[in-house]
Amino acid sequence: MPTRLSPTSAVLLLSDYIRGRKRALRVVVALIALLVSAFAVLGLSDLFGWGLKEWVFSLLAGTKTWLLRIIK
């Protein structure tokens, strides 16, 4: 026999659901801000000639090569 939720229980469950969604939204917003900041730093590095972009891409290429070697 299914149990019925009291209105108070339903409100508490809904508030937990909404609170969880807000937390997830804050995490997504923080990740987007971090990504935009990283692209801004790479752009400034390119403008000032610091070579950060080349270092990051060479690191990614080396990681890709290493991972492909492990998988095979």
Image (cartoon, rainbow, N blue to C red):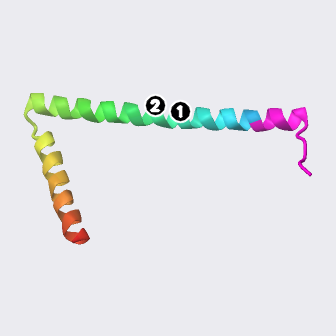
Left or right for 6, reference 63: right
- Quarter holding the C terminus? bottom left
Other residues around mark 2 within 10 Å, as few (<14) / some (14–19) / many (≥20)? few
Q: Residue at x 21, y 59 (%)?
A: 63
Q: Secondary structure at mark 1?
A: helix
State left or right for residue 50 relative to residue 68.
left
Q: Position of residue 44 (x, y in %)?
A: 17, 29
- Locate residue 36 relative to residue 54 in the image: left or right: right
Determine which quarter of the picture holds residue 4. Answer: top right
Q: Residue at x 10, y 37 (%)?
A: 50
**As displayed, is residue 4 above or below residue 45?**
below
The answer to whether the residues at label 2 and label 1 have Cβ atoms under 8 Å apart is: yes
Q: Which residues are magenta?
A: 1-13
- Tell me which residue sits at (39%, 32%) in the image: 32
How would you rate the neighbour count of disc 1 (Cα within 10 Å): few for under 14, some for 14-19, many for 20 or more?
few
> Looking at the rendering, which quadrant does residue 5 occupy?
top right
Give the residue number, with chain letter if any, for mark 2: 29
Tell me how far mark 2 sits from mark 1, CA to CA. Answer: 6 Å
Foreground of the two, 45 or 24: 24
Quick one: which residue is furthest to the left in this view?
Answer: 49
Estimate the x, y position of residue 58 in percent, counting from the top left. Answer: 13, 51
* Residue, far front: 1
Total marks shown come to 2
Residue type marked 2: Val
Residue picked out by circle 1: 25
Q: Is residue 11 magenta?
A: yes
Say which amino acid is labelled 1. Leu
Identify which residue, 48 or 43, lies in the foreground: 43
Question: Does the magenta-highlighted stretch encompass residue 15?
Answer: no
Residue 52 location (% of width, % of height): 15, 41
Q: Position of residue 29 (x, y in %)?
A: 46, 31
